[in-house]
Image: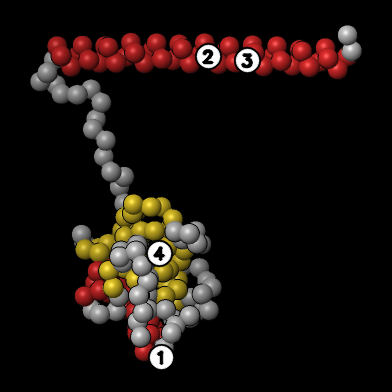
Amino acid sequence: MSEIVKLHREARRSRFRAQGRRRARFGMAMLWAAAFLAVAAAGSLALPHIGPILPAPTAPAPDIVFVTLGLCQGGRGSDCVIDGDTFRLDGQSIRIADIDTPETRDFQCAGEKDLGDRATRRLHELLNAGPFELLTYERDEDRYGRKLRIIGRNGQSLGQVLVAEGLARTWDGARHSWC
């Protein structure tokens, strides 16, 4: 038998032994998990006034941010507002998920550019007015790699503040003309 065939067979045997060890560890883990659940169920049945052994799952706590943001120059910069619905924080672009604002760079008309500039300045003011929360959205990122977050303060969406002031629209999943 050639040396290559011997090496190949030994490699296969080694893989099968490793798979067997992994299966055995998995089986043992499943056995321990079943035993734990049985004990937990028995304990909660015997002592119903104590309540469940495991805490109920909770939503992750929002990130609370207090930082002074500047205005990004040409879409570049760190810790700055890019436009009316996007800012950069610690090098990561964050898109406000619940609104859409007019474009400031690829605008379709002068009115869109003007409204977009006003939305950018207002978002800058709102973010710098004090601590704000970054709340998770149904998706983590958009197709451009920006984090999708709802921005809140005292239980109120800052995006919806922009909507109420006529500087943004509630995001409905599609872009609409501002002209």
For mark 4, what is the residue? 95
Q: Are marks 3 and 2 in contact (CB under 8 Å)?
A: no
Residue 107 vs 25, above or below: the answer is below
For mark 3, what is the residue? 18
Residue 125 vs 156, above or below: the answer is below
- Ranked by sequence position, the earlier of labels 3 and 2 is 3
For mark 2, what is the residue? 23
Percent x, y for residue 22? 55, 16
Q: CA distance from mark 4 to mark 3?
A: 46 Å
Relative to 28, 152 lies left or right: left
Relative to 26, 41 lies left or right: left
Q: CA distance from mark 2 to mark 1?
A: 66 Å
- Residue nearest the viewer, comparing 134 with 20: 20
Residue 73 vs 37, above or below: the answer is below
Q: Are marks 1 and 4 in contact (CB under 8 Å)?
A: no
How many neighbours does mark 4 have within 10 angstroms: few (below 14), some (14-19), or many (20 or more)?
A: many
- Ranked by sequence position, the earlier of labels 2 and 4 is 2
For mark 1, what is the residue? 110
Percent x, y for residue 94? 42, 63
Which quarter of the picture shows residue 151? bottom left
Identity, as a three-letter code, of the amino acid under mark 1: Ala
Residue at x 15% of width, y 14% of height:
45
Q: Is residue 130 visible?
A: no
Q: Is residue 177 visible?
A: yes
Percent x, y for residue 12? 71, 15
The quadrant of the rendering that contains the N terminus is: top right
Q: Are marks 2 and 1 in contact (CB under 8 Å)?
A: no
Residue at x 34% of width, y 71% of height:
100
Q: CA distance from mark 1 to mark 4?
A: 23 Å
Q: CA distance from mark 3 to mark 2?
A: 9 Å
Residue at x 25% of width, y 64% of height:
157
